[in-house]
Image (cartoon, rainbow, N blue to C red):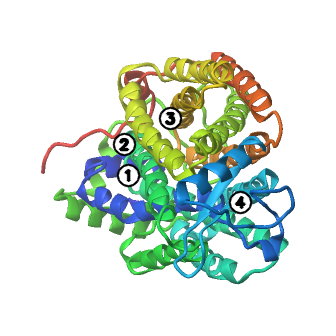
């Protein structure tokens, strides 16, 4: 009988034993710190102030040569002077080095340096997603998660002892690679033990954790710790995950795809036991098969099985284009918000994280009550509207900052709705592969956004129009996709048929 167990029957078994029961929720809590870590690493480059003697890339706040100096006067006057001088360079960053063993310094970092650090990290992240897609079936998500955590720790403990810019960027690339593998491994692990009907809920919850990471990162960055100590904190958080990695099970989906159905059955029985359900594997074969079925020879990287109404090639091209453009828009709003927030990055990132958490809640409510495509069209159109509004409010920094946050709210909502659309259009477990590839494409778009966001001159008058045009382009691409609704979505996929209590 176990030879007949495929991914479709596995999903019905997971639904039968609770779908997203207390055991799955516990695993989500165990994996949540890895997503918290991801948010820290993505924006860590914005809080790293390198020593001028090593990199010679810091602007003097009283002249235009490349060095660091202290400003005379009280602290408020010093900060205001530094902010005013940095403002002349348009969209640059003010760092505050507040170490008890060193005098306080105010520095303006060259925009191209920040862009390089962030772009290299994002390109490494894109590579990590692609490599995971190619190797997940062979090694399994849990083994990749362990290896990625080890690589991340090595990068974090090595960066503080590095004295060369090129080596720093290499380490940032490897760190981005490891963080991407951590992210997608944890995502596949939690989705692999959860019924498909609850996958959108899991994605929304993890998006909330991502927003929380921005808030916690800002709180840590505002502390009097040195930047090397901040990097060490992220490494320690990775070591914390190692302490209970054995409690996280391997994905039963991986066992099924590898033909090890006995291990998958044992794991499903364990889930049923923890959730307080009784399970009979034999009875699942007597359930009526739905109209839409899936292939039994699925892999993590075969992009097939889309509904007949949407041609496979058109669907994949649209999703790829949408995620490329949205990766650009999301990263641009994420990077611009701290700079416009009166040159105080901690304030910008804190408010940005709060906006992301609210956006995740908003996306879940909209997904339940409104058609997915309609919501995505509206939110992407509002991105363009708020970015255009930033141009008219460029003279008032507070108004511009509010518009940027609203644009980020719409961008993150669109991002989440597009994830749900990607899941809706693929009824098989191959949608994991589609989701991973889309993550990589979004990283490439985000890497391009870093250079558009860090312009030294005329940044506002070039970045915002580009973002507005892309917002309209994203909106127009949704017309190629059929509309989806939660009720239609639940009827169109393979739903687990509930069994009577035994």
Q: CA distance from mark 3 to mark 2?
A: 11 Å
Tell me where residue 296 appears, x and y as whole percent: 54, 50
Mark 1–mark 3 CB contact (< 8 Å):
no
Mark 2 sits on what residue? Answer: 198
Tell me where residue 274 appears, x and y as whole percent: 21, 64
Crowding at dot 1, Cα within 10 Å, few <14 / some 14-19 / many 20+, comes out as many
Q: Which mark is residue 112?
A: none
Q: Which residue is at the far right?
A: 65
Mark 4 sits on what residue? Answer: 121
Helix, strand or loop at mark 2: helix
Q: Is residue 147 left or right of residue 16?
A: right
Please determine whether, in this image, residue 264 is positioned above or below residue 419: below
Query: In the rendered image, is residue 298 in sight?
Result: no
Q: CA distance from mark 4 to mark 1?
A: 31 Å
Q: In the figure, residue 322 lies in which quadrant?
A: top right
Residue at the spot 60% in from the left edge and 24% down from the top edge: 383
Q: Return the disc, 4 or 2, that comes first in the chain's sequence.
A: 4
Residue at the spot 87% in from the left edge and 61% down from the top edge: 65
Helix, strand or loop at mark 4: helix
Mark 1 sits on what residue? Answer: 194
Tell me where residue 113 appears, x and y as whole percent: 79, 57
Tell me where residue 192 appears, x and y as whole percent: 44, 56
Mark 2–mark 1 CB contact (< 8 Å):
yes
Mark 3 sits on what residue? Answer: 420
Q: CA distance from mark 3 to mark 4?
A: 26 Å
Q: Return the disc, 3 or 2, that comes first in the chain's sequence.
A: 2
Residue at the spot 37% in from the left edge and 47% down from the top edge: 195
445 and 422: which is toward the camera: 445
Q: Return the disc, 1 or 3, that comes first in the chain's sequence.
A: 1
Crowding at dot 2, Cα within 10 Å, few <14 / some 14-19 / many 20+, comes out as few
């Amino acid at each position: 009988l176990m030879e007949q167990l495929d991914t479709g029957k596995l999903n019905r078994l997971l639904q039968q034993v609770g779908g997203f029961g207390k055991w799955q929720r516990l695993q989500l809590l165990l994996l949540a710190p890895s997503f918290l870590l991801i948010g820290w690493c993505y924006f860590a480059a914005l809080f790293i102030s390198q020593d001028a003697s090593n990199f010679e890339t810091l602007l003097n706040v009283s002249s235009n040569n490349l060095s660091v100096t202290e400003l005379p006067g009280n602290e408020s006057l010093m900060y205001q002077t530094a902010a005013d001088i940095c403002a002349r360079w348009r969209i640059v960053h003010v760092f505050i080095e507040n170490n008890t063993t060193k005098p306080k310094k105010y520095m303006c970092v060259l925009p191209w340096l920040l862009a390089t650090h962030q772009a290299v990290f994002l390109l490494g992240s894109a590579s990590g997603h692609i490599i995971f897609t190619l190797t997940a079936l062979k090694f399994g998500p849990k083994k990749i998660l362990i290896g990625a955590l080890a690589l991340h720790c090595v990068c974090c403990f090595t960066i503080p002892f590095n004295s060369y810019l090129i080596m720093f960027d290499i380490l940032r690339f490897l760190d981005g690679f490891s963080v991407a593998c951590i992210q997608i491994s944890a995502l596949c692990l939690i989705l692999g033990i959860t019924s498909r009907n609850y996958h959108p809920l899991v994605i929304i919850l993890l998006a909330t954790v991502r927003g929380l990471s921005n808030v916690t990162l800002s709180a840590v960055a505002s502390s009097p710790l040195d930047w090397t100590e901040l990097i060490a904190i992220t490494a320690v958080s990775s070591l914390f995950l190692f302490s209970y990695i054995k409690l996280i099970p391997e994905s039963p989906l991986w066992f099924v795809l590898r033909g090890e159905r006995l291990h998958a059955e044992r794991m499903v029985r364990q889930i049923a036991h923890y959730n307080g359900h009784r399970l009979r594997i034999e009875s699942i074969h007597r359930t009526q098969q739905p109209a839409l079925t899936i292939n039994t020879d699925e892999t993590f990287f075969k992009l097939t099985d889309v509904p007949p109404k949407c041609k496979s090639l058109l669907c994949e091209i649209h999703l790829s284009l949408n995620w490329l453009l949205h990766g650009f828009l999301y990263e641009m709003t994420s990077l611009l918000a701290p700079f416009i927030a009166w040159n105080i990055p901690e304030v910008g990132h804190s408010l940005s994280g709060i906006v992301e958490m609210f956006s995740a809640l908003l996306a879940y409510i909209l997904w339940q009550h409104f058609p997915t495509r309609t919501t995505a069209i509206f939110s992407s159109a509002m991105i363009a509207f708020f970015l255009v509004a930033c141009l008219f409010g460029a003279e008032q920094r507070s108004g511009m900052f509010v518009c940027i946050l609203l644009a980020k709210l719409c961008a993150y909502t669109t991002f989440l709705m597009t994830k749900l659309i990607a899941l809706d259009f693929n009824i098989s477990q191959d949608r994991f592969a589609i989701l991973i590839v889309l993550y990589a494409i979004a990283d490439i778009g985000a890497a391009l956004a870093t250079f558009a966001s860090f312009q030294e001159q005329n940044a506002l008058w070039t970045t915002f129009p580009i973002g507005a045009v892309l917002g309209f382009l994203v909106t127009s691409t949704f017309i190629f996709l059929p509309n989806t609704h939660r009720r239609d979505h639940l009827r169109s996929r393979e739903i687990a048929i509930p069994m009577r209590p035994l």
